[in-house]
Image (spheres, helix red, strand yellow):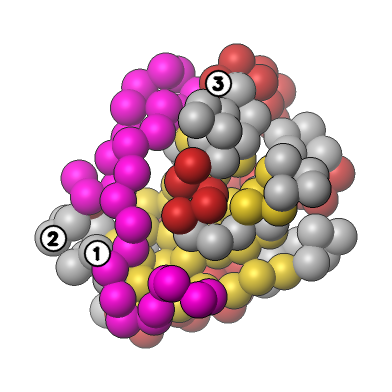
């Protein structure tokens, strides 16, 4: 991270979810911590497995007064089909247009692929970045470590 600093403010954004509803990061301030999960592509192998893992562990994530927001550059319609096909019951946010604007703000946009890198951030209730991890595209993220980072905020 060059411009982003752990302990510094998380860039605010408003993106549409798989239902076309606006979701604004700052709306969680003073209420919930937020796990931002950037993933390359809906329906791809590793991403499908990761999102299913989050779905299975969603109650664990929500235990810490937190929310999970998954972000890709896929269009809303693809995210809706992805959510419906895999029973994903948490917000899938579209950073489709302007293409990758939020992903770039978090410094995880892969210019060659036109998609986010496989990265996660934990934003505390004050809107500050508390943790970040960046995984190779071919490797799924460690959800246990994500949960440990949330628990550390409690």
Residue matched to label 1: 127
Q: Is residue 52 left or right of residue 66?
A: right
Q: Residues within 10 Å of mark 2 (few under 14, many from 20)?
A: few
Front-most of residues 144 and 29: 29
Q: Would you name the residue on which mark 2 appears?
A: 30
Q: Provide residue 122's location: percent of width, then percent of height.
A: 42, 68
The reply, left or right, for residue 18 in relation to residue 116 is: left
Q: Residue 69 location in percent, x, y? A: 45, 47
Question: Which residue lies at the image location 60% right of the left edge and 15% below the top edge?
Answer: 77
Task: Using the image, determine if residue 61 lies above or below residue 3.
Answer: above
Q: Earlier in the sequence, mark 1 or mark 3?
A: 3
Residue drawn at point x = 71 percent, y = 49 percent: 111
Residue found at x 41% / y 27%: 16
Give how far across and how far down residue 142 sits, in percent.
67, 71
Q: Secondary structure at mark 1?
A: loop
Real-space Cα separation, disc 1 to disc 3, in angstroms: 25 Å
State which quadrant residue 45 falls in: top right
Q: Is residue 133 visible?
A: yes
Residues rendered magenta in the picture: 1-27
Seen in the picture, residue 78 relative to 14 is either above or below; the reply is above
Q: Is residue 134 above or below residue 27?
A: below
Q: Residues within 10 Å of mark 3 (few under 14, many from 20)?
A: many
Q: Quadrant of the C terminus?
A: bottom left
Q: Which residue is mark 3?
A: 76
Quadrant of residue 140 in the image? Answer: bottom right
- Look at discs 3 and 2 and give the one toward the viewer: 3
Residue 153 covered by magenta stretch: no
Q: What kind of element bears circle 3?
A: helix
Mark 1: few/some/many CA within 10 Å (<14, 14-19, 20+): many
């Amino acid at each position: 991270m060059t411009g982003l600093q752990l302990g510094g403010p998380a860039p605010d954004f408003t993106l549409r979810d798989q239902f076309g509803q606006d979701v604004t990061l700052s709306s969680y301030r003073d209420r919930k911590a937020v796990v931002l999960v950037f993933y390359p592509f809906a329906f791809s192998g590793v991403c499908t497995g990761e999102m299913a893992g989050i779905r299975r562990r969603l109650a664990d994530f929500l235990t810490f007064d937190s929310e999970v927001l998954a972000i890709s550059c896929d269009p809303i319609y693809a995210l809706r089909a992805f959510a419906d096909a895999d029973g994903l019951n948490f917000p899938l946010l579209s950073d489709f247009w302007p293409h990758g604007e939020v992903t770039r703000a978090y410094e995880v946009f892969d210019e060659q692929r036109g998609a986010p890198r496989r990265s996660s951030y934990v934003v505390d209730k004050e809107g500050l970045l508390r943790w970040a991890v960046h995984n190779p595209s071919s490797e799924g993220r460690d959800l246990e470590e994500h949960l440990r980072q949330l628990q550390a905020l409690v």
